[in-house]
Image: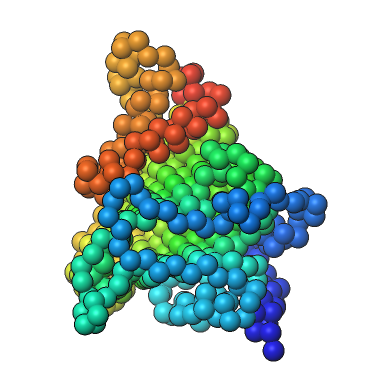
Amino acid sequence: MDHARADILAARHRLQDAGWIPRDAEAFRHLPPPPAAVWLGEAPEAASTGCDARPLSGAGWTLHPLGQTPQGRVDARWLDATDPAQRKELFAGLPLPFHAEGVAETGDTTQQDAAPFAWVHHALCRHGLRLRVGGEHDSGHRVAETVWIQLRHQPRSAVEAPTLVIDVQDGVHCVLVETHHRHHREGVACEQPVVQNLHTHIRLGASATLQHLRSVQPGAADRVAHHLHLQLGPDARYEQGLIATGSRYHLQRQVVELAGVRAEARSVGLLLAAGADLEQQVRMLHTGERTRSHVEALALASGAARAVVNAYTRIAPGAADAEVRQRLTGVPTGGQPRLVLRPHLEIHHDQVQAAHGATWGALPEDALFYARQRGLDERSARGLIIEGMASALLARAFGNPQFIESLDLAGLLHQAVTHHLSDDPTAPTTQQEAAHG
């Protein structure tokens, strides 16, 4: 029996029986995703779409050293999900595509809203990468080590559902820079507009740390949905800094399960939407005692862009002494964008510390004035101020100035901000108030 084929058919049957995400789904009501046919490659416009990706052109996942930093042990396996044995290895130990019964496990009922994305992914997945980060001494005892990795992804086909699985072993400190850049490397892989439904599973062992910088800059016509599923063990720490730009449809969704005692997660997002769509969903699920989470986002939008930030944190009945923070900020940089900021806390324990908030504002006029006094034009002045705000934001994600310099974060920010302003025809004009959701 072809188990790979059976698995694919089962996912399609589940999708057919349950249907696609309804327009009134709570998690997606401000920016509904395209229909299932788009993600399956069955939409009319995808019928004749081709892709120029070649096997050795840099398409798919590629693994690189990060600067001159010392390298630890990384075991990498590129797997073909159409081969039954390799598909079994790729999905080994991962939760099955979400179903209604799973609500009881986390208490987050809105996870069911995103279930169709998981079914489509299971039905379409053809390739994946598994990384095991960190090793052991011959004696079998874990040793503290730091592993620096750069991971790049370029589309392999016009409609794809890649998989990434990362296991960080106990006590290992990992630094990962992950990039998905479409408009900076012309001719590398697929030249057509891309539909991409990526699912990443990250598991941190006891006392493991992952500092994760993600830069996702799709093409203007791309439709992209990235889903990150994270599980943190005791004393594990996860820090993510996200730089994301808008496209025809762009979703960044992460679900973090803080099950281990004293587990800690920090998610900071810089969202740049110039006349395009962009949504970030961050869901922190506290089930372990003395856990901490911090969610912060800065959304800058212009033109007719739609930018949404959905932050949801749940503290389960057994999560004593949890500490949670949410801080969301939206800034229109020109035109009439629509900005929606939704902080949300669900607390089922009395012994917690929690705070959340959302603010809208404009770029500081005094800073613009002083920048212009230095001889900068309007666009350059705006770029300088935005880069300063973004640098301060991401510094709060990682905290270590030397660490930030080693990642060339300033270069990534300059690249993203320059691209944002170049796509914003209203950038030199006086900004107008955005419509608020």
Q: Is 268 displayed left or right of 88 in the figure?
A: left
Can I make out residue 126 in this image?
yes
Q: Quadrant of the N terminus?
A: bottom right
Residue 70 pos. (x, y %): 27, 55
Q: Is 316 displayed left or right of 303 in the figure?
A: left
Residue in the picture at 60% in, 45% down: 188
Residue in the picture at 48% in, 52% down: 152
Work out whether residue 311 or residue 274 is closer to the camera in this orientation and state it: 274
Residue 24 pos. (x, y %): 59, 59
Residue 281 pos. (x, y %): 45, 56
Residue in the picture at 56% in, 24% down: 425
Residue in the picture at 31% in, 31% down: 388
Q: Quadrant of residue 71?
A: bottom left
Q: Is 424 displayed left or right of 46 in the figure?
A: left
Q: Is 339 displayed left or right of 55 in the figure?
A: left
Q: Is residue 192 above or below residue 423?
A: below
Q: Is residue 51 above or below residue 208?
A: above
Can I make out residue 435 in this image?
no
- Give the colour scheme shown: rainbow
Q: Quadrant of residue 99?
A: bottom right
Residue 194 pos. (x, y %): 65, 50
Q: Is residue 266 above or below residue 118?
A: above
Q: How many marks?
A: 0
Work out whether residue 123 or residue 80 is closer to the camera in this orientation and state it: 80
Work out whether residue 164 or residue 255 is closer to the camera in this orientation and state it: 164
Q: Is residue 219 above or below residue 61?
A: above
Work out whether residue 105 or residue 361 is closer to the camera in this orientation and state it: 105
